[in-house]
Image: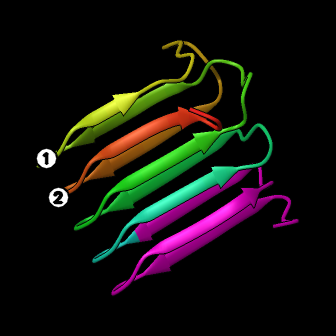
Amino acid sequence: MGVSGALRLSTSDGSVLATGVGATDVEARSSDGDVVLSLGTTTDRVVALSSDGRVQVALPRGSTPYRVDAGSSDGTTQVQVPTDPAAPRTITAHSSAGDVTVTQTGQ
């Protein structure tokens, strides 16, 4: 995507899909659709939220640990990345009605 700094993506009716994201601060939201992010580089802060859809965040393989806050009110939650509650890099991934997955590329 070739973006540095902050990247904000949102939709009220539809999905958000971003691949190769290189921003250091990423926020993606959908009121009615999926949020799917594939990060191309290590990112300091990721927020991925959907009111009605799945949330998927894929980090580059070999990423450093993240402080992860992930959950779903009506779906499964899988976190398959290195985590550390004291890590400076953060991921927030939530869905009210859909599965939430935080993984590394290639998994």
The crowding category of the residue bearing disc 2, from other C-alpha atoms within 10 Å (few below 14, some 14 to 19, many at least 20), is some
Q: Amino acid at mark 2?
A: Ala
Q: In the visual, does 43 lie left or right of 101?
A: right
Percent x, y of residue 27: 56, 60
Check disc 1 and report its element: helix, strand or loop.
loop
Which one is earlier in the sequence, the residue at label 1 or at label 2? 1
Name the residue located 64 percent from the left edge and 30 percent from the top edge: 89
Q: Which quadrant would the N terminus be assigned to in this image?
A: bottom right
Q: Residues within 10 Å of mark 1 (few under 14, many from 20)?
A: some
Residue lying farthest to the front in this orientation = 106
> Is-magenta flag for residue 13?
yes
In the rendered image, residue 88 lying in the magenta stretch gets the answer: no
Asked whether the beta carbons under mark 1 and mark 2 sit within 8 Å of each other, the answer is yes
| Cα–Cα gap, marks 1 and 2 | 6 Å
Report which quarter residue 54 is drawn in: bottom left
Residue corresponding to mark 1:
73
Q: Where is residue 59, by image quadrant?
A: top right
Q: What amino acid is labelled 1 in the image?
A: Ser
Q: Position of residue 102 (x, y in %)?
A: 47, 37
| Mark carried by residue 97 | 2
First to last magenta residue range: 1-29
| Residue at point 44%, 42% (across, down) | 92
Place of residue 28 in the rendered image (x, y in percent of width and height, measured from the top left): 51, 64
